């Protein structure tokens, strides 16, 4: 099993690497196209501001490489958002894998959403062994609108897509690497896809 | 629904966990990594590590400890104490910290909040505010609560929110170490005037205090140290009781 975490300078990738270490898998951090293409499984992380992250992807040419990947890809947090059509954050064009738009939470809730919330309406092998209404850790100010590719939903002022799947591409808004045992189970499920 | 968070705070000095009573006397309460793992298993929602020696003595926060915690703990954690630059934060995040908390350095140079939010995102910028109520006025204090300022708590909190703070960790110096409950009125005012999460800190002595901090204080999270470190309030029991009072928690 060769697992690569795409390292494009956006986000806390160490915690993802450590989470896989706890599952007994050595994940490689890389922005090298050859290394990414040769991987069995790929994690596309991201924390921070969307337009800055997209700029970094473009600088390394990863914006054209990622959509062509055939292996299972898991976008986490901002990584998931960048796989959508577009995001309101910095008026940023996404990679267009998930046919949905990312919007900012309205001010009738505290922004960012920070903490543990439930995921429900689970429908994907990614969630094998995960119970409906399991708690996941989330930190975000923008959310993906519900769409046909939604595989989990969460309520925070609005009912939104907290996980998405299109073919070999998976995306989760929550941080499985920080979501205790249930989060680790989801990462383990991804390894077994 | 987003749940209310329970956050044990581990005060760190020389790589060991200590707890100051009113920030002065120190008692040893163990190894930070072992404690962190234990708290994660018990159902703590998050952890905060404060290098209490850092601001007073200028000692940098121990990156090595942060790395060990990140390796072994599967819940989010914040690191604070002696952080005064973008470089300090970069190093901590590289070691696996999820958030950083800044305090005195933000008061000395408020632009730091903007710089951190722009470079790393608001989600990892916690601004810790130590304040004391003097003649009815809440005033910000610096350097672990030892230096008073003329800055108003609520004005300062609003300012750091506008500068890009993602969260406020409010410690009442009047309540810290007393075990008489949190500063619920000030908490409620903060929670109502700001649109970012507020962590209540200082004064936890029993389970009812947590119920009050969430119901009366409208806090998003509650932080405590010694009641957890010395087993006075077991976290599973606390969360069960919160749920019995219709407060949403992760169980």
Image (tube, helix red, strand yellow):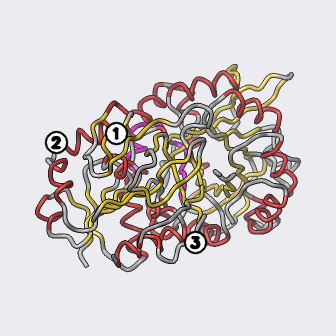
Left or right: B61 in relation to B251: left
Q: Is residue B20 above or below residue A190?
A: above
Tag 2 or tag 1, which sits nearer the N-term?
A: 1
Share a chain, discs 1 and 2? Answer: yes
Chain bearing mark 2: A
Q: Could you tell me if the residues under marks 3 and 1 are in contact, i.e. CB atoms within 8 Å?
A: no
Residue found 52% across the figure and 67% down from its top: B73
Distance (Cα) linking label 2 and label 3: 40 Å
Foreground residue among A155 and B21? A155
Distance (Cα) linking label 3 and label 1: 31 Å
Quarter location, residue B117: top left
**Which element carries disc 3, helix, strand or loop?**
loop
Q: Which residue does the numbered mark 2 point to in the structure image? A: A59
Residue found 46% across the figure and 58% down from its top: A175
Q: Which residue does the numbered mark 1 point to in the structure image? A: A50
Residue found 66% across the figure and 21% down from its top: B155
Where is residue B21 drawn, in percent x and y? 78, 51
């Amino acid at each position: 099993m060769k697992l690569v975490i795409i390292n494009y300078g956006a986000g806390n990738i160490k915690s993802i690497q450590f989470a896989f270490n706890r599952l007994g898998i050595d994940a490689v951090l890389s922005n090298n196209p050859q290394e990414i293409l040769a991987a069995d499984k790929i994690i596309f992380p991201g924390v921070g501001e969307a337009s800055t992250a997209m700029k970094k992807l473009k600088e390394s040419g990863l914006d054209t490489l990622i959509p062509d990947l055939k292996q299972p890809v898991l976008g986490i947090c901002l990584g998931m958002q960048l796989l959508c059509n577009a995001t309101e954050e910095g008026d940023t064009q996404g990679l267009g894998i998930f046919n949905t738009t990312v919007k900012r939470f309205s001010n009738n809730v505290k922004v960012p959403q920070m903490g543990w919330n439930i995921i429900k309406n689970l429908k994907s092998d990614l969630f094998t062994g995960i119970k409906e209404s399991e708690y996941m850790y989330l930190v975000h100010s923008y959310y993906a609108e519900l769409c046909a590719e939604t595989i989990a939903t969460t309520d925070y002022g609005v009912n939104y897509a907290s996980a998405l799947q299109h073919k070999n591409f998976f995306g989760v808004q929550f941080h499985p690497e920080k979501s205790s045992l249930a989060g680790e189970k989801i990462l383990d499920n991804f390894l077994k896809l | 629904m987003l749940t209310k968070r329970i956050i044990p705070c581990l005060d760190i000095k020389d790589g060991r966990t200590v707890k100051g009573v009113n920030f002065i006397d120190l008692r040893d309460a163990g190894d930070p990594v072992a404690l962190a793992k234990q708290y994660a298993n018990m159902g703590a929602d998050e952890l905060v590590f404060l290098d209490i020696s850092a601001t007073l003595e200028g000692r940098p926060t121990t990156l090595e400890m942060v790395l060990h915690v990140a390796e072994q703990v599967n819940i989010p954690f914040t690191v604070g104490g002696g952080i005064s630059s973008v470089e300090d934060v970069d190093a901590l995040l590289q070691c696996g910290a999820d958030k950083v908390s800044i305090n005195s350095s933000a008061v000395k140079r408020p632009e730091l909040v903007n710089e951190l939010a722009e470079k790393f995102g608001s989600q990892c910028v916690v601004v810790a505010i130590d304040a004391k109520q003097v003649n009815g006025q809440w005033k910000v204090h610096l350097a672990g609560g030892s230096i008073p300022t003329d800055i108003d708590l609520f004005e300062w909190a609003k300012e750091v929110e506008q500068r890009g703070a993602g969260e406020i960790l409010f410690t009442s110096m009047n309540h810290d170490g007393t075990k008489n409950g949190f500063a619920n009125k000030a908490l409620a005012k903060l929670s109502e005037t700001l649109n970012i999460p507020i962590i209540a800190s200082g004064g936890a002595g029993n389970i009812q205090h947590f119920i009050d901090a969430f119901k009366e204080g409208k806090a998003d999270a509650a932080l405590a140290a010694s009641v957890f470190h010395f087993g006075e309030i077991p976290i599973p029991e606390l969360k069960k009781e919160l749920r019995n009072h219709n407060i949403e928690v992760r169980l």
